[in-house]
Amino acid sequence: MLGWAVTFLVVALVAALLGFGGIAGTAMEAAKLVFFVAIVLFAISAVMGLLRGRSSSL
């Protein structure tokens, strides 16, 4: 997911350099949204991993 965020960021930067302000703004918003969704999913995954703990394999 972070790869998608970086991709949208690069698209936004290229669009801004070429003068396409609307596209750059939209791509930047998409990059921020995907980044924060990835962070939230990572946090949920980390908490669930800590709550589950280690399973003993006897």
Image: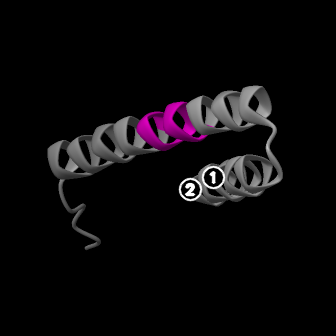
The magenta stretch is: 31-37
Of residues 51 and 46, the one nearer the viewer is 46
Q: Main secondary structure of the magenta part?
A: helix
Decide whether residue 57 is among the magenta residues.
no
Can you give x and y, in whole percent of width and height, for residue 38 in the image?
A: 47, 43
State whether residue 44 is above or below residue 6: above
Identify the amino acid type marked 1: Leu
Residue hosting label 1: 9
Instruction: Say few, some or many: other residues with alpha carbon within 10 Å of mark 1 (under 14 / 14 to 19 / 20 or more).
Output: some
Between residue 49 and residue 20, name the one nearer to us.
Answer: 20
Q: Residue at x 79, y 44 (%)?
A: 19
Rate crowding at label 2 as few (under 14), some (14 to 19) or many (20 or more) other CA atoms within 10 Å.
Answer: some
Measuring from the top left, give residue 13's x and y in whole percent.
Answer: 67, 55
Q: Quadrant of residue 24?
A: top right
Q: Which mark is residue 2?
A: 2
**Relative to 25, is 13 above or below?**
below
Q: Report the quarter where the C terminus lies.
A: bottom left
Image position of 20 (left or right of 50)? right
Point out residue 11 in the picture as x, y percentages from the top left corner: 76, 52
Q: Secondary structure at mark 2?
A: helix
- Where disc 1 sits, the SS reads helix
Q: Which mark is residue 47?
A: none
Return the disc, 1 or 2, that comes first in the chain's sequence: 2
- Image position of 4 (left or right of 52): right
Q: Residue furthest bottom?
A: 58
Q: Nearer the viewer, residue 25 or 4?
A: 25
> Considering depth in this image, is 28 or 45 the residue closer to the camera?
28
Residue occupying the point 70% across, 59% down: 10
Q: Residue at x 59, y 41 (%)?
A: 31
Percent position (x, y) of residue 45?
35, 45
Which amino acid, by three-letter code, is at mark 2? Leu
